Image (cartoon, coloured by chain):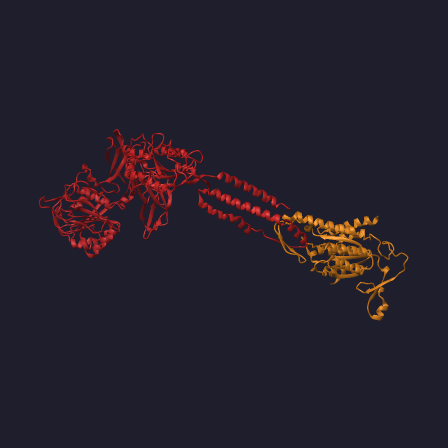
Chain colours: A orange, B red
Amino acid sequence: MADSESPSYLDPLAISRGESLGILARNVVEGYRVGEHRSPFKGFAIEFAQHREYTIGDDPRHLDWKVLGRTDRYYIKQYEQDTNFVVHLLLDGSESMTYGSGKVTKLHYAKALAACLAYLVLLQRDAVALGVFDTQTREYIQRTDNLGKIHHIMNRLAAFEATQQTNLGVGMSDLSRIAKAKGIVIVLSDLFDDEEGFERGLQQLRFSGHEVIVFHVLDPEEIEFNFKGRVEFIGLEGAPTLETNPADIRKTYLKEMDAMRLRMRLACDRTGSHYVLTNTTHSLAETLSGYLVFRHKVTAR
Amino acid sequence: MTFINPAILFGLLAVGLPVIIHLLTKPRLKRIKWAATKFLLKSVQKNRRRVQMEDLLLLILRCLLVALLVLLFARPAFLTDSAGVSLGGEASTVVILLDNSASMGQSNGTETRFDQAKSMADGILSKLGAGSAAALYLIADGAKPVIPKPTQDFAVVRRSITQASLTDRGTDLYPGLKAAVDLLKAVPGGHREIFVLTDSQEAAWHELAKIRQLQNENKKEIIMHFVIVGERGEDNLAVSGLQMIGTVAAVNQPLRCAVTVNNWSKTPVERVPVKLAIDGDAPQDEAMIDKIDPGTSRTVSLFVRFREPGYHSVTASIPGDRLPADNQRSLALLVLEQIRALVVEGTTNPDLSARDGFFLKHALAPVRPDQVDEYPVKVTVGQSSELESSTIDQYQLVFLSNVAQLTPLGAQNLQRYVNSGGALIIFPGPSTDISYYNTTLGALLPAQLGATKDAPATQKFLGWQSHDYAHPVTALWNDPSSGTLGGIRVSKYYPLAAKPGDSASRIMVKYANGEPAVMEQSVGKGKVVLFSSTATTAWSSLPIHPAFVPLLLRIIAYATSGPGGKLDLAPGQPFSFEIDSGYAGKELSVLRPGDKKKRIAGQVEASEHSALLHDTDTEQAGPYQLYVGDDPKPKVVFAVAADATESNLMQEAKADVDPLIAMADTATPQNAGVSDKPKEKGQLVAGPPIWFPLALAALLLAIAETALAHRFSQSK
C-alpha cells in the first residue's frame, strides 16, 4: 500500500496532546542518547549489539558494508547506543477485539491507539516495535526510530484482520524472548483470555526488565451492558451462541465484569505494571492524554 | 360444585391463550456478535433457574387468570341438597306459570291483573328458600317458555318477569301445566312445585278434566299452587264482533258493518256509543245502543265509505273501560274500484223476462236504470262464445246460467280464469249437460251434478234450510231479523254429490232434507259456487225470493274478497301474503296496532313464482299495515282480533275449579315455598352462584400478575 493511501489511524488531537507530554520512560531505559532518558550503561563506549535485516526506511549509513560485501545481504549494524528507548506495542489481534457496539470496534480503537503511540515515540526519536498477536505472533515490525516508517506501521496495522482466538501469555512470552533490550511494552487488549497466562506473561516481561503498560480496551456495552429486549449473543472466538433477556442478567454480568477488571488490575499491580482501562467511547486524545498526564506525574517523582 | 352456564366452560380452552400469545408475540431477536461470552455464560447459568421460575410463575398466573374469568362467566355454584336447608329456608324447584292472556289486562284502577300477577310472582321468588331454582313460562292459549330450565339466578327470573308483556290471546291453562309437569319430572327427586298465576277465567279451565288428571297423576311428586288474581272488577263491555254485511266493498259505496257489543257485567249498561272508522281515521259513523242487559249482546249496523280502492281496515270501538284490549275490534278487507260481472246465458229467448240471465242481471245491479252507472257492479249479459275471448279476464265474476256446454277454448279459458283468481258461479238449468260438466269442468266444480230430481211428490216443493247456517255467506240468516232462506223452494234440482276425497269443497246452504243446495270451493286463486237449481223461476223460487239480492251480493263479496279470511287472524297467528315477485328483496315495514310510526320488519321474501310478505309478530289485536319499499300506501292490511272469550272476566267458574284448587293444596304468595311436605334428601341442585370470591380472586391475580411482571422486567 502506498504511503499516501495509509489509513489515518493518527488522531491529530491525540498526537498534539501526546506530543506535548511525550513518552517518558517510567523506569530507567537503555538509551544511548544523553538527555531525555537515563541510560543504565554509563561510561560504556559504543558497542556492537547485533545485526538485523535492513528494512525500508532504515538509514543506509548503518548498513554493514562488510557483510554486504561478503554475503550480498543488507544488514544493519546495530549498537546498543542506537536506541534511546524502545516501545514495544503489543496489539491483541484476536477475534474478540472485532466487537464494537458503535461504529468503532475495539480492534480499530486499539490500532489507532497503537498508531498514535508509535508516532509519538518516533517523533521524539525513540524506537518503536509492533507485534500483533492472537494465539501466536501474527505480525511483527522490527523496532525502528525512523519517523518515516510510521506509514509502514499503519499499513501493516490496517492490513491485519482478526480471525483467531487469543493467547495473551504466548504473545507476551514471544515478546519477552524477542525484545532483548529493556524498554516499554504497551499491551493493547480486551484481556478476554486466560488470566493466569496473562499474569505469567506480565511477570516474564517484567523479569526481562520491561516496563509494562496494559491498555485494557473495552466497549461501553461490555462495561455497562445496557441491552434492551431479547438478544441472541453470537459468541466470538468459538464461544457458544446464547439467547437471553439481558435485563434478567445485567447485575450478575456487571458483577462478573467488574471482578475481572479488578483481577486484571491486581495482576498488573502485583507485577508493577500500569493498568489503563480504555473505553472505546472515549476519544483517543482523552485516553492518551489521560494516561500521559498520569505517567508524567509518576516520572516527575 | 356445578355451573349455571356450563357451555361457557368450553372457554377453558382459552387457558392456552397466554402460551399461544407468548409464542405468537415472541419479541424479535436482536443478534449481536459478542466478545465477553464468558461472563455472559456465567451470568446466564447463575440466573437461569430464577428466570425460568419467574417466567413459569407469570405463565401460571396468566393461565389461572383466564381460567378464573371463564369460570366466572360459567357461573359456578355449590351443589346443595334441594330437600335440605341451605341458608335457613327450604330449597324447591319451582315453575312459575304467568298468565299473559288478554283478560289479564283488566285494571282495578291502579294496576292490571297482569301487574298483580307479576308482583305475586316476585313475592313467590322472595319466599322461596335458599338454594331454590325457578323456571318461568308465559301461558295464554299455549305455553311460551321464558326461562325453560330452573335457575337459581333469581335476578334473571325477576328481570324476565318484569319484561313479560301481555298478549291478546285467549287462555288455556292445560298446555302450561303440562309443560311445567314435564319439566319438573325431568328434575330428579326433591321438592317440586308449580305456581299458576292467573285470573282464572272460565275459558281457562275448559280442559279441566285433563288438568285434574294431570294433577292426580303427579300429586305425590309435584305440588300445584293456583294463585288467583283480579278477584274484583269483573265488569266489562266488549266489542265482540265486527262483520261486513250485505254488499261488496267498493269505492264510494256505503259498506254496512254489524258491530256486536257484549255486556259481561252483572248489571245492565245503558247508552253505549259505538263508532266505526276506517284506517285509524276519525269515525265515519256512530250509533248509540240504549241498553245492553247483563250477559247479553247487542248488534248495531254502521256504515263506512271508502274513497280509494285497495286494502283497508275497519275498526269498531266503544268507550274505554278497565280492559282496553276488547274496546275495539278491527277487520281488514279489499276495496274494489268496481266489479264487472259476465252473465252467460245458455239459451236465447225473445221474451227478455224468460231469458236465463234476466233475474241475475237485475239482482246483480238492483238499482234504477239511471243509477246503474254509479252502481259498482257492472253486468254484461252474453253467450258462451264470450268465454272464448281473452276479455274474460276483465270480469271479476262469471255466471253460467243454464249453459249446456262450452266450446273447448271457452272451457280452457274459464279454467285459466278461475285459477288466476276469477270467481265462477254456476246455475244449472234444463239445458245443462251434466256429463259434460262432471267431466270437462269437473276440476272446477265443488261437487258432481246428479241426474235431475223432482221435489218430493207429497210436498211439491223442496225448501232450503231455515236455520243453522254454517257458511259465512249464509251465516247472516242465522239472525231471524235478517229473514230466512227457508222460504226458497225448488221443484226440480240436480243433486250435488261431494267428490270422493275432496275436502276443499264446502256446503253453503242445504235443502231442508239435508241435501246440499249450494256448494263452493276455492280453485287456484279463484272460487267456484255451484247451485243445484236454476237462476230462473223454471225450477226455483230463488230469483223472486227477497233473499236473492242479498245472497248474490254476499256471494259477490265472498268471491271477490281476495285472500278472504286470510286477512283476519287470531293473536299469534302468522300472516303471509303473496305479491308480485318483483317486490322480492325490498324492505318490509309494518305499522302495528298502537304504533305511530311504521317499523322495519325485514325484507320481502322471494317465493317460487311470487314474493311473500311475512309477519309473525301478531300478538296484539288491531289492524296491521304492511308497507313495501318507499311506497307510502300499504301493500296489504290485515287485522288481528282478540279472542272474544277473553272479554268475559267473570270468575264464576271458581265454584267448579275450587275443588281442584283445594285438592292441589292451594297456596297464597304469602305462604308459597314453605310447604309442610316432608323433605326428600338426596337431590342436588345448583346453589347461588359464587361469583364474588371468583371475581375477587381474578382481581387479585390480575394485580399480582401486573406487579410481578413489572418487578421481573427490572434489571437483575
Give the camera-side residue of B164 and B242. B164
Give the camera-side residue of B42 and B270. B42
Q: Residue furthest right?
A: A43
Quadrant of the rendering where the N terminus of chain A is positioned: bottom right
Residue B670's image quarter?
Answer: top left
Residue B684: % across, % down: 42, 40
Give the camera-side residue of B395 and B76. B76
Residue B104 in sight from this viewpoint = yes
Q: Is residue B713 above or below residue A62?
A: above
> Which residue corresponds to the image point at 74% horizontal and 63% vertical from the top-left?
A2
Q: Is residue A209 above or below residue B554?
A: below
Q: Residue furthest left?
A: B458
Residue B676: % across, % down: 37, 33
Residue B582: % across, % down: 34, 51
Residue B656's image quarter?
Answer: top left
- In the image: residue A20, left or right of residue B208: right
